[in-house]
Image: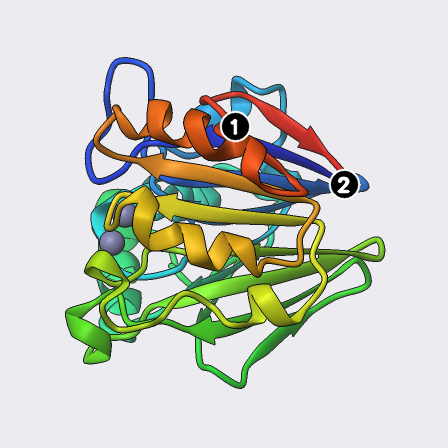
Amino acid sequence: MKITFIGTSHGVPSSERHCSCTMIEVGEKLYFIDAGAPLPDSMLRQGKKVNDIRAVFTTHVHGDHIYGLFPLCDLVSWHYKKAFITVFVTEQELIPLIKDTVRLLSGTDPDKRINYELTLPDKVYSDDLVRVSFIPTKHKEGGAKPSYAIRFEAEGKKLIFTGDLSGLLSHDDFPKEISQEETDLVVCEMAHFGVEHIYPHMQTAKTKTFCFTHVCPLDKYDMIEEIKNDFPFSVITPKDGDTVEL
Ligand SMILES: [Zn+2]
Ligand SMILES: [Zn+2]
């Protein structure tokens, strides 16, 4: 399995960072966690084919996690005629917005080649390669609107993406599964709290690699550097385009 960090920025893009988007290759097939980067442009630049995408899982409805769904769904509806993609979104209202955009832009049937799914806590996506499940968090309005961490399992490995979490972790929504389950990789956001808030959770994490993305403000990169040797696992801060092989 190969993980490529397509976009590692928070909230807004910068000259060197797209917004949140991670591509996971399992065999020949592609899966995405969040679609905040321009898709499919940025994956094509990695030499990947749209026809190989199986599913896109989004953690919550904020622009830096879903903007890329619009061009992707539009292009799949009329151009990539061999693609068939499942798209998970966390709020029902987003589905007609994407479909209406596709209809407006290209006049095509928005349900052609795209299967839209609403993420729910007990829903599981599985195919012959992967199993994906969802852990509720409280990033949006303290949990009044849905947001999820995502557990991704394939080839005997397990990854957990935290998605965005509550400000200062004040709603205690860092996924407890990260200290309960053995994982190969944790991908944690780092925009809504400080190193001092995440540190105790890192002390109990049962992972082999702890990865920070969505880092804001940028001086947190230096703060992470200062604590990274305190743990029995590796702590990494990938840039756009960096990869991890599991
Ligand atoms: Zn975000
Ligand atoms: Zn957010």
Q: Secondary structure at mark 1?
A: helix
Question: In the orientation shown, which residue stands out farthest toward the front?
Answer: 230
Q: Residue 197 in the image: state x and y as whole percent.
A: 32, 54
| Quadrant of the frame with the N terminus | top right
Q: Secondary structure at mark 2?
A: loop
Q: Residue 133 in the image: state x and y as whole percent.
A: 59, 71
Q: Is residue 43 left or right of residue 154?
A: left
Label 1 vs label 2, nearer the camera: 2
| Quadrant of the frame with the C terminus | top right
Q: Is mark 2 within 8 Å of ligand 1?
A: no
Q: Is mark 1 within 8 Å of ligand 1?
A: no
Q: Circle 2 is placed at which residue position?
A: 1
Q: Residue at coordinates 26% horizontally, 43% vertically from top-left?
A: 191
Q: Amino acid at mark 2?
A: Met
Question: In the orientation shown, which residue stands out farthest toward the bottom?
Answer: 122
Q: What crowding class fits label 2: few (fewer than 14 Cα within 10 Å), some (14-19), or many (20 or more)?
A: some
Q: Circle 1 is placed at which residue position?
A: 43
